[in-house]
Amino acid sequence: MAAESRGSPAPGLTLSETRLLLGVGLAVALVAGLVFRIVGHLVLDPSRPAVVAAVFVATVPAMWLLAVGIFRWRGHTDGARREAAAILVVPGMLVDAVSTALFQVVYPNMVLGAAGLFGGLLLLAYATILVAGFVEVPFRMGDVAVGT
């Protein structure tokens, strides 16, 4: 039997880096929740589909830039970037599991009909961050690379 040659696995994130990313993810989730608590009724009003569509469209580049900015700030590339993306979304997903289940209590300013829109927007935001961790899209603005 021939022995298989395997490269050594990429080292994972340190415990302190993981904690920092969990904290950043939690902070982002709490700030976003506060923003929707204040202005959610204006931006996720089912009777204003153009505004809702604009929010959905704006969410993708906003979350992409946020994720890529965090990856750059922390110097994450390749496997660390993928791991960081997964860690970043976990706190928000946990918080939002509760906030969507208690939608009328947490977001009394929004009509119940906005709950589905809110849940969809959350899924879009988390999916965008995860994809940003797995897909590196080089954009060039002049001589400055963006998104790498």
Image (spheres, rainbow, N blue to C red):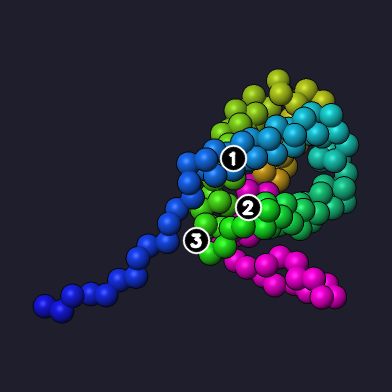
**Measured from the top left, where is residue 15 in percent x and y?**
48, 41
To which residue does mark 2 refer?
Answer: 74
**Vertical order, 16 against 102 (above or below):** below
**Measured from the top left, where is residue 58 in percent x and y?**
81, 54
Find out whether residue 101 is within the magenta segment: no
Query: Of callouts 3 and 1, which one flags the residue occurring earlier in the amino acid sequence?
Result: 1
State which region is magenta.
123-148
Query: Of callouts 3 and 2, which one flags the residue occurring earlier in the amino acid sequence?
Result: 2
Mark 1 and mark 2: Cα distance apart in space: 10 Å
- Image side of residue 112 versus residue 50, left or right: left
To which residue does mark 1 refer?
Answer: 20
Going by the numbered disc 1, the residue's amino acid type is Leu
Residue extending farthest top:
105
Q: Is residue 120 visible?
A: no
Going by the numbered disc 3, the residue's amino acid type is Gly
Dots 1, 2 in contact, CB < 8 A: yes
To which residue does mark 3 refer?
Answer: 79
* Residue 113 lies in quadrant: top right
The residue shown at (70%, 39%) is: 28
**Measured from the top left, where is residue 132 in percent x and y?**
63, 60
Q: Is residue 123 visible?
A: yes
Q: Nearer the viewer, mark 3 or mark 1?
A: 1
The residue shown at (57%, 62%) is: 77
* Residue 32 lies in quadrant: top right
**Vertical order, 31 against 8 (above or below):** above
**Vertical order, 117 against 75 (above or below):** above
